[in-house]
Image (spheres, rainbow, N blue to C red):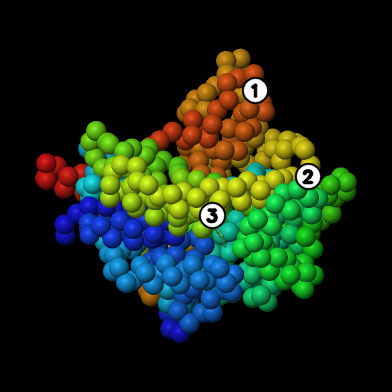
Amino acid sequence: MTEDTFRLMGRTISFRAGESIAAALQAVGVLTYGPDALGNETRCFCGIGACQCCLVRVDGVVREACITLARPGMSVEPMERRNA
Amino acid sequence: MRDPDILVIGGGPAGMSAALEAARSGLAVELVEQRESLGGAIYRQPIEGVQVIPQSAGARGRWAALSQAFSKAAIPVRFGSVFLGVDGHGYVLVENRQNGLVECLSPRAVVLATGAVEHVHPRPGWQFAGVSTAGGLQVMMKETGTAPRGSVLLAGSGPLLIAVAAQMARLGNPPLAIVESGDPYRRIMPGLSMLGFPKLLAEALGYLKDIHLHRIPWLRGSRLVRIERQGERFSAVVRAGDGSQSTFVCDRIGLHDGIRPNDYGLPQASSEAAAGPVILRAGDCREALGAIAAEADGRRAGRLAIQGVAASAADDIGKIDRQRRAQALLARLFAPVDDRSALDELADDTLLCRCEGKTVGDLRNLCQRVDSLTGREVKHNGRFAMGACQGRFCAANTAALMARFKPEAPASSAADLTGRRWPVRPVSIGALVRAASRDNDTQ
Ligand SMILES: Cc1cc2nc3c(=O)[nH]c(=O)nc-3n(C[C@H](O)[C@H](O)[C@H](O)COP(=O)(O)OP(=O)(O)OC[C@H]3O[C@@H](n4cnc5c(N)ncnc54)[C@H](O)[C@@H]3O)c2cc1C
Ligand code: FES
């Protein structure tokens, strides 16, 4: 099994090849990815790309953490930076 | 690349069988899937090196046959691609997330097979991080081969809850309890009728055996009424049938109140579009009847897509009818014991629409106006079902609550609130503008 890492708000997160961002974060106990525009906690809810509760910025582009593959070296940031 | 004759959206059992069936005709077929792997919700594939979650023998066999036939047919799949909608000119818009471009395709037929979404009733605290749908916890288990950590409470209603509980137990972390608003043991008639569906029954009994072995409390006739934060954990208040309340302290909560078609924002099915492709729906996004029906329905739609007219597919229709009877039985079996609706007694500050932060009280205020608002007006004035999820998780609840708050007004449906608009999913303006300029170039 290959292990690699990406960055979440400056923190290094390891993941296994083929894993979604949400799965990699759950494995290290991260269940929220910062606040959204309304100040709600983002989180993995439906797991299938439908609810849009898990939105993050992946290298600047808004993506669902539950259906986006983790890739080596990517940077994952919360939707809103103000409280981060 | 030449545009395909038939474009299938969604790589679950319905989409895969539709593509297979359509490809037999020799026409060029392509499949669009937002993820990087096929399988859909039920056959979500594990990452490399991870044990496949033990599924029932029937499900294993169905996946083996379907996936082998699919790879043999060598149908091209656009992975990491999200279907956005069909524009006014009849172009099918697909966001290719690998290169960030929106592609405009003009197939002769489109089969939409976007699956189901879980229904979740609003409960105070359902919006907290750490609260997921039960199916969401399940697909994550299938992907990673690990159960969610800590103590987990499952709540809501239906057979999916016992499946998730059994799978968690098999992976070494049985849930604290399953809170079930129905009580299948008390529903004798539908219970006996399930004997007519031996495969479904065997699957359910397999799950119940694990639940028994691991002594997981199955709290039938009970409801999770409130979730509160308690430091890093949750305290979950459960009300039993006799009105007594108990509190569970837990780390994660999985909610599930049933399943419904993921048809939000999809273009209407059409046999002969004035401009643009024939549009068909297949599987759970047409009618949520589960995996067996989805595969049969995919074949039906695949055949229709080639012919463009009603095809005779008696054996598939028979399969779908049978699964419809099974689902109706299951609904009776798991009918809530408590006559009061889960929507009664919700405190005004309960979040109803998470994307826009709108509460039960906000809706009550809107409904107290003298003139009755339509679903569409509640959306435009109140922002319900206006947000990024397109009402997938609040529109049905909002419509049901509107009927409670103002029973004398004409009833609104979830579709009245959501309307029919593309894009099906949010997309960046930049990507759309680039697609539009290419569209103009080709005209
Ligand atoms: C979370 C969840 C878990 C479930 N677990 C089970 C289970 O364990 N057992 C069971 O019997 N049933 C389960 N179901 C019910 C399930 O809906 C059916 O059994 C079966 O998966 C339906 O097949 P389908 O092909 O219609 O849809 P799905 O299998 O849901 O396939 C739909 C596919 O379309 C893709 N898609 C959706 N929207 C787009 C878009 N805009 N662009 C591109 N691709 C898109 C999705 O990624 C998915 O791969 C579950 C449902 C859900 C929602
Ligand atoms: S968890 Fe629902 S879209 Fe990702």
> At which x and y percent is residue B417?
50, 32
Compared with B74, B300 (above or below) is above
Same chain check for tags 1 and 3: yes
10 Å neighbourhood of mark 2: few (<14), some, or many (≥20)?
Answer: some
Chain where mark 1 sits: B
Indicate the amino acid at tag 2.
Val
Residue B337: which disc?
Answer: 2
Same chain check for tags 2 and 3: yes
Q: Residue at x 58, y 59 (%)?
A: B135
2 vs 3, front mark: 3
Residue B406: which disc?
Answer: 1
Q: Is residue A81 visible?
A: no
Chain where mark 2 sits: B
Q: Residue at x 53, y 35 (%)?
A: B414
Secondary element type, mark 3: loop
- Write down the residue under mark 3: B290
Distance from the alpha carbon under mark 2 to that under mark 1: 25 Å
Quarter of the image for residue B357 reads top right
